[in-house]
Image (spheres, rainbow, N blue to C red):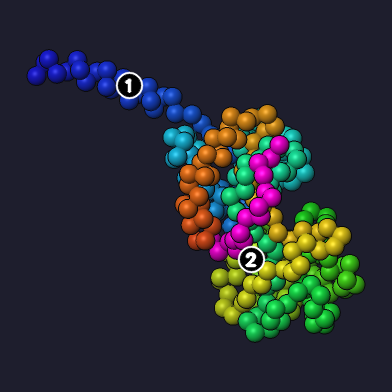
Amino acid sequence: MYSRFPKAIPLALLMCAVVAQARDIRVCADPNNLPFSNRLQQGFENKIAELLAHDLHAHLVYEWQRMGRGFVREYLGKRCDLLIGIPVNFKPVLTTEPYYRSTYVFVTHRGRLAGVSLNDAALHTMKIGVQALEEEYAPPGDALSRRGMQSQIVAFDTTGPHPDAIIRAVATRKIGAAIVWGPLAGYYARRFSGLTLTPVTPQVDPPGIPFTFAIAMGVRKGDESLRNELQDFIHRRKASIRKILHAYGVPQLEMATEQRVGE
């Protein structure tokens, strides 16, 4: 019996060494921005981060900070290693290839405004909710304004304490329709009966306002090693990532063939 004991010691030391060498992977995340992330780690970006950490045998650590201007400059590469969701080829960071592509959608009552587009004359007769981003409208607000519908616009803050307010306003008929970023619309619209989500058309509004965005992971400029690890993870766990997105109601479009890894 004694002769077996020394053989167990190297194994125990090896296991301790593996645990000790487990790396931290530091993720920048918003503490109150469902369906993307929150401190309770209930968002789909939290679930993807958990999958990533498990896949890399790493310890997941969050740097909680509201996303806003200057965030990337102050935090990425200093307090955290990566962003889970960032538009592909977003110039301040080095991005992976996208892992999903989504769109702004019209949120309407079922049977109302079937096949609606930005050029639908019926939009001139109703109040239309759009998301407010700091002191500006999201892209749909600019497109509506260009069509002379400034007085129809009702702005909603979807990053505050009531992120579902814009969806609720449609459900309770306080406004006739809303144009909302797909992941947020898909998540909150499921809480109300009788709502329909319709992708905004055209996908690019002249002179060049996009309504579809491919979303990637982002690291600091120059960190090709981590970017490549993330890229391999996205390829390897593509089906699992899509399953998470589907569970949260994220509208998923086919990837555009021109999407590339960030330079």
Position of residue 171 relative to residue 184, above or below, is below
**Discs 1, 2 touching: Cβ within 8 Å:** no
Residue at the spot of label 2 = 185
Of residues 178 and 42, which is closer to you in this image?
A: 178
Position of residue 227 relative to residue 172, above or below, is above
Label 1 – label 2 distance at C-alpha? 49 Å
Crowding near the residue tagged with mark 1, few <14, some 14–19, many ≥20 C-alpha atoms within 10 Å: few
Image quadrant occupied by the C terminus = top right
Q: Main secondary structure of the magenta part?
A: loop
Of residues 3 and 115, which is closer to you in this image?
A: 115
Q: Is residue 250 magenta?
A: yes
Question: Which residue: 19% across, 15% down?
Answer: 6
Crowding near the residue tagged with mark 2, few <14, some 14–19, many ≥20 C-alpha atoms within 10 Å: many
Question: Which residue: 62% across, 61% down?
Answer: 253
Q: Is residue 36 magenta?
A: no
Q: Left or right of 46: which side holds 258?
A: right
Can you see residue 53? Answer: yes
Count of numbered marks: 2
Q: Position of residue 111 (x, y in %)?
A: 65, 84
Residue at the spot of label 1 = 14
Name the element at disc 1: helix
Q: Position of residue 197 (x, y in %)?
A: 64, 72
Position of residue 241 relative to residue 17, above or below, is below
Stretch in magenta = 248-263
Give the residue type at disc 2: Ala
Q: Quadrant of residue 180?
A: bottom right
